Image: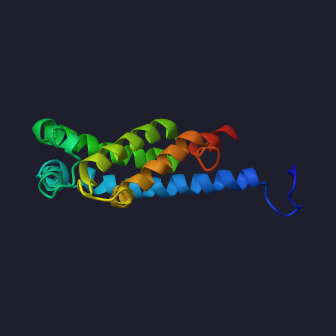
Amino acid sequence: MRAFGTSMGEPDPAIRNSQALALMRIGVGVLFLIFGEYKVFGPEFTLHGGFQFWINKFLTEGGAYPLMVAVLRDFVLHHARAIAFLVAYGEFAIGLALILGVFVRAASVCGFIFMLTLVFSSDYPGSGAAFWQYFGASLSHSVFALCFLAFLVGRSDAVWSLPRGRSRN
């Protein structure tokens, strides 16, 4: 069926948009699978202080927003091993869910919350920074947060997802 405003050989713009969103979903999923894989299958992050190293780095180098300092120091470091496993398996699960196109909304909620946590834990530009520097300092996490919002608002699982592939059979 031809959509309004398209020529015979050109795909429907809605299909192209769904495919673009799915491509972004799969790309973010691959990155999160990589982020989680080395943490899940290697003991350095979870069992040998890798997670604590990063939290201490955020605290000592001033990367944490002032509101997060006490949380990181008094809660996160006191429960570091459990939270390290949560981070490792969480990243891995988010990646797997996005790649397969299953539980995309749940994975996106978790990913969005995780990215906000990382923004406030590691991306503080300092109290004297100009307004725009807050955004510049958080690019590595805010871009992923925006991707997760797009997956929540859109239907990134409309194509190239396990549930959609199975429903055609």
Residue in the image at 57% along x and 57% along y? 23
In this rendering, does residue 120 appear at all?
yes
Query: What is the basis of the colouring in this image?
Result: rainbow
The x and y percentages for residue 2 are 87, 52
The x and y percentages for residue 63 are 21, 55
Q: On screen, 101 above or below 106?
A: below
Residue in the image at 38% along x and 56% along y? 135
> Which of the 4 image quadrants contains residue 19?
bottom right
Q: Using the image as rendered, state which of residue 33 and residue 152 is in the foreground.
A: 152
Q: On screen, 76 above or below 40?
A: above
How many numbered discs, if any?
0
- Left or right: 156 as drawn, with respect to 136: right
Residue in the image at 41% along x and 58% along y? 31
- Left or right: 14 as drawn, with respect to 136: right
In this rendering, does residue 101 appear at all?
no
Q: Quadrant of the C terminus?
A: top right
The x and y percentages for residue 37 are 32, 54
- Left or right: 100 as drawn, with respect to 90: right
